[in-house]
Image: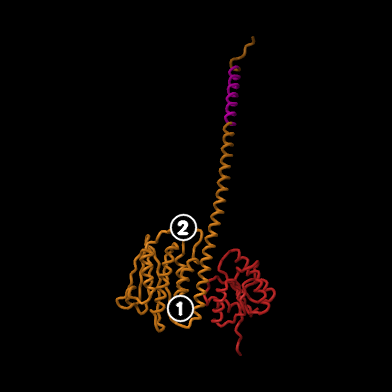
Chain colours: A red, B orange
Amino acid sequence: MVLEKPRILIVEDEWIIANDIKDSLVEMGYRVSGIASSADEALAAAASEGPDLVLMDIVLKGDRDGIDAAREIHERFDIPVIYLTAYVNEYLVEKAKDSEHFGYLVKPFRERELDIAIRMALHKAAKR
Amino acid sequence: MATVPITLILILVTILASGGLFIVFLIGIARIERRLMHSRKKLSDKVREKTRAEAVLRHTLNEKEMLLREIHHRVKNNLQIVSSLLRMQARRCGDEKTRTVLRESLTRIQAMALIHDNFRGADDPLGVSVRKYFQDLAMNLFEIYSVNPEALTLECRFDDISLTIDAATPCGLIVNELMTNALKHAFPYDRRGNITIEFTRRDDEITLRIADDGVGLPEEFTPETSETHGLMLVKNLVENQLGGTLEIRGNGGAEFVIRFREPEYAKRI
């Protein structure tokens, strides 16, 4: 039996960084279901593509941040979310702590860190 | 005329005199109290004024600290975008030589970006923690060059030093070049070994030592005769940027010892 490669949605408002992450994920053997740059786009992509996992940048374009989007994605679709952030801000950490999430990576992260975080999140989500 | 006993007169005079003195004493006390109250009011006005000034200062300081963090964040973000661009280009490049050049440029940019990640903050606004920065830098290179941690080990010895950004930038680039060199050339054919990075301070002299126990350097090696651009970059950064000295030993591995005094922070604006 061949196991399907997990499909990942990238939510990141820097197009270049999003595509760099996409390349890394493909190299690591994952499939990328899409790239979204705002909370609304992320929700639409989660509804239409049904990814296995979402990599969510916390600071996004628009009114809502990644934590708001992650909360809604979890409530509506029960998809595990890993937060990505370049900015370790106490307020954001506290806000993120209250939301259901499966990891928190501070950018710039190494490919290996990303791979481990994804594998652990998928494993944890499968066990629920 | 009735006679009044002299004793009674004396008593009356004493009472009157001491009563007068007492009144004078009370008036004095009241005056002192008034002066004291006036001084206390002036003092509390001054304290209030000082507290207000302190609050304004603290607010300004917080604002400046926030701005400084924001600038570091933005610089880091921009350097990360450049890194992503180079990495994407390297992945799509068919030519190995070009890929190597892109990868080397990528590590140089990341060496600089990491400085902004390791900036210490308000308690040391110009300081970069040597221990954390160079450990991050070395681990980053180990990942980029896909080093097998069982074959090649990293030994770090750091005094508790923080450098100004003016010194941290050239030091970061120097460590980046020398470690890249070691990772590329010192351990061919999966040779096992060790790379050491040391950062020590004695009085105001800082010594940076990077050594490996790999294949060593060619005989009569000098940065000028070296084929790589990296070692000339190291020599120039040591001598021209840090105003320091570079010592190279190539027997039984390679050893680079850099000594410099930390340059004072130079205002740019």
Query: What chain letter is assigned to the residue under label 2?
Result: B
> How far, Cα to Cα, is label 1 from label 2?
39 Å
The verdict on a common chain for dots 1 and 2 is yes
Quadrant in the picture for the N terminus of chain A:
bottom right
The amino acid sitting under disc 2 is Ile
For this orientation, the residue located farthest to the top is B1
Task: Give the image location of residue B244, x and y in percent.
Answer: 35, 64
The residue pinned by badge 1 equals B145
Residue numbers of the magenta segment: B9-30
Element under label 1?
Answer: loop
Mark whose residue sits in front, 1 or 2: 2
Which comes before the other along the chain, label 1 or label 2?
Answer: 1
Q: Residues within 10 Å of mark 1 (few under 14, many from 20)?
A: few
The residue pinned by badge 2 equals B269
The amino acid sitting under disc 1 is Tyr
Do residues under tags 1 and 2 come within 8 Å of each other at their CB atoms? no
Q: Is residue B8 left or right of residue B123?
A: right
| B11 inside magenta stretch | yes
Query: What chain letter is assigned to the residue under label 1?
Result: B
In the image, what residue occupies the spot 34% across and 66% down? B245
Give the vertical position of B160 relative to B223 (above or below): above
